[in-house]
Image: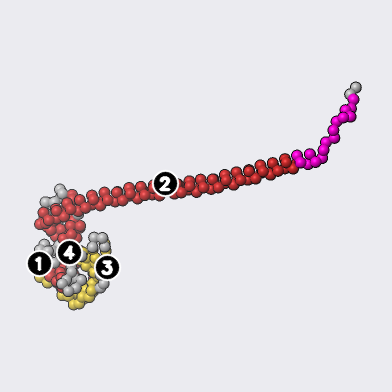
Amino acid sequence: METLDTNQQPINSDIVSQQANFIQKQNKVAEIKYKIFAFVLLILCIWFWGSLESKIAEVDALHTNISDIKNTNQLLDIKIKSDQTNKKIIWLAKEQYDLIVNCINKRICSGITTNKEISSNLDNLRTFYLTNKLEGTKMSIDQKLVLKAIDDYLLKKDGNSIGQIQSITYGEQVTVNEEKGIFKLPINVQIEFFNKEEFVNYILNTEKYLDPALKYRVFFKIVSMNYNIANYESLQKVTMLMEVYYYR
């Protein structure tokens, strides 16, 4: 049988209270440490994410820049090839002028049918022959040259006149291609034709044929007209809106 130890000291309440306070303080310190650690970790995460986003943006910008450079190089390659082709066509245009004019005007193309670079670019060659500078000595546009080109070529067939200019007015210059210096000038022309054949010849001279002498290198385009086809045998005054193309 056990016997009680009458000599055992009773537990002091102050000691228990002190130990509880110490444990509570330790817990608070640990809690503060955890909060500080969590705050620092949050700051590091925000900094890391911001840095990561910055790096991602830099990588995206780099990829975009590389893509732009590739596109620029491709465009340069295309332009170089186009310029080389144009130079070759211009050289052919000068070397084969008589053959090209006969092909355009008389459809006698036997001498150039085997040359695809010429046969496939007849419209471009015609434009090249006709597009010229139109600057005058005292004006930006040499209006006399435009007038003479109409009167001395567009209104001629086999050396004979096929119509008479009644009036001509000039509009404002319009930029077609600023890089290449190509412009156009709208004009309103009223011309008197005696019959349909003369009117048709005027259209052919304007948009199909080529002045073999190239006295007046002016490229014209008909935009609209008011010709009355029902009165094709009668004298008519035809008003036309035309465009004159040139470079500066």
Instruction: Tell me which label, 3 or 4, sits earlier in the chain.
Output: 4
CA–CA distance in space, label 1 to label 2: 70 Å
179 relative to 93 in the view: left or right: right
The location of residue 15, given as percent across then percent down, is 79, 39
Q: With respect to residue 95, does 41 lie above or below?
A: above
State if disc 2 and disc 1 touch (CB < 8 Å): no
Instruction: Tell me which label, 4 or 2, sits earlier in the chain.
Output: 2
Q: Is residue 150 magenta?
A: no
State if disc 1 and disc 4 touch (CB < 8 Å): no
Q: Residue at x 17, y 64 (%)?
A: 132
The location of residue 95, given as percent across then percent down, is 11, 54
> Which amino acid type is marked by label 1?
Asp
Residue that mark 2 sits on: 59
Residue that mark 3 sits on: 174
The picture quadrant where one finds residue 131 is bottom left
Q: In the rendering, which numbered label is found on residue 132?
A: 4
- Mark 2 crowd level (few <14, some 14–19, many ≥20, 10 Å Cα): few
Instruction: Tell me which label, 3 or 2, sits earlier in the chain.
Output: 2
Q: Residue at x 21, y 67 (%)?
A: 244
CA–CA distance in space, label 3 to label 1: 34 Å
> Which amino acid type is marked by label 4?
Asn
State if disc 1 and disc 3 touch (CB < 8 Å): no
> Which amino acid type is marked by label 2?
Val
Residue that mark 1 sits on: 158
Please state which of residues 57 and 159 is positioned toward the viewer in this rendering.
57
Residue stretch in magenta? 3-19
Query: Does the rendering let one see residue 228?
Result: no
Q: Nearer the viewer, mark 3 or mark 1?
A: 3
Please state which of residues 180 and 161 is positioned toward the viewer in this rendering.
180
CA–CA distance in space, label 3 to label 4: 16 Å
CA–CA distance in space, label 4 to label 2: 49 Å
